[in-house]
Image (cartoon, grey):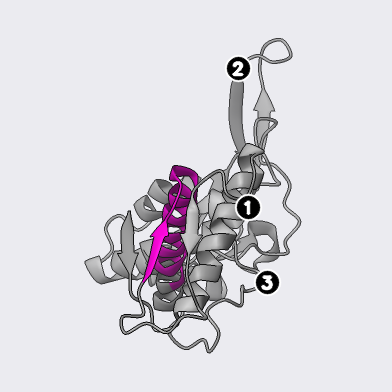
Amino acid sequence: MSAIAPANASGYSAVAALLNNAASAATGGSPQAGGSATSDAATPSADPTDIVDLSDRAKQVLARAKSEQAAADKLSALVQSLNPDRKNPEAKPKSDDGTSVFDKLSGRTRQQTSDTEWAAGSKYGDPSISDAAFVDKYKDAMLGALTGFPPEKVAALQAAIDSGTLTFQKGSDVPGYNTRTSVTYSGEPGGLQGMSTSGHAAPTGSAKDAIEAGNAFGFWTEDRGDVYVTW
């Protein structure tokens, strides 16, 4: 038994009756089976207090509604904190998904996928790999390409990886990047992979200058063959 002193006594009586009816409908009983809600709106009272006796079912419905509302409020607050400039936090961005929420929480920007049509560097490669997956797979090799350069150069590359601002080009499309790698195989089909490089030459022109300055590098990958990377 709980005593409630609302500002609008008749309104709370209607809510209590509605909850009792909902509980009765769920259990197949009559509207009065789950409990009673009494209020004498026609009789004046010095103390406008309704005595409401809710069934266990009605109490469960009410408690669940409160819990779900609290969860919704927390989610709304989280979305608003991620997008403080938005006027309507309930409006969902068309391009938003679970991954983008994770990226926002982790402070990471996803690498934008380029429009380049890649060809695998070996029969074991996957040319359809996205730029983001490519970065995750070859990040250590990319950082290793700047071994021996000043720390600020490595830091700049790391920042570009984190912000998703790397640019990938086919080595054959870059003037002055003269390495052309081909792969041959030995043994029966499905046997061991052996690599040989053909048409290799030192870089020249602007490609040479960028590589020597620590602002670019080129390397071979099984997924995309010869790749020239800038940031």
Q: Quadrant of residue 74?
A: bottom left
Earlier sequence position, callout 3 versus callout 1: 3
Residue 130 numbered tag: 1
Q: In the image as oriented, which residue stretches furthest toward the top?
A: 188
Q: Position of residue 146 (x, y in %)?
A: 35, 58
Does dot 1 land on a helix, a strand or a loop? loop
Q: Name the chief secondary structure element in magenta.
A: helix
Name the amino acid, label 2: Leu
Q: Is residue 202 visible?
A: no
Using a 10 Å C-alpha cutoff, classify the residue at mark 1 as few (fewer than 14 neighbours), some (14 to 19) or many (20 or more): some
Ranked by sequence position, the earlier of labels 2 and 1 is 1
- Residue pictured at 67% horizontal, 64% vertical: 114
In the rendered structure, the answer to whether residue 128 lies left or right of residue 195 reads right
Q: CA distance from mark 3 to mark 1?
A: 21 Å
> Looking at this view, is 87 or 214 the one in front?
87
Calculate the distance from the C-alpha at mark 3 to the C-alpha at mark 2: 47 Å
- Circle number at residue 192: 2
Select label 3 or label 1 by which is in front. 3
Q: Is label 2 in a helix, a strand or a loop?
A: loop
Q: Is residue 56 above or below residue 149?
A: above
Residue 93 drawn above or below residue 219: below
* Residue under the point 31% across and 85% down: 46
Q: Which segment is the magenta one?
A: 50-76
Which residue is rendered at x = 42% and y = 47% of the image? 141
Quarter-wise, where is residue 92 in the image?
bottom right
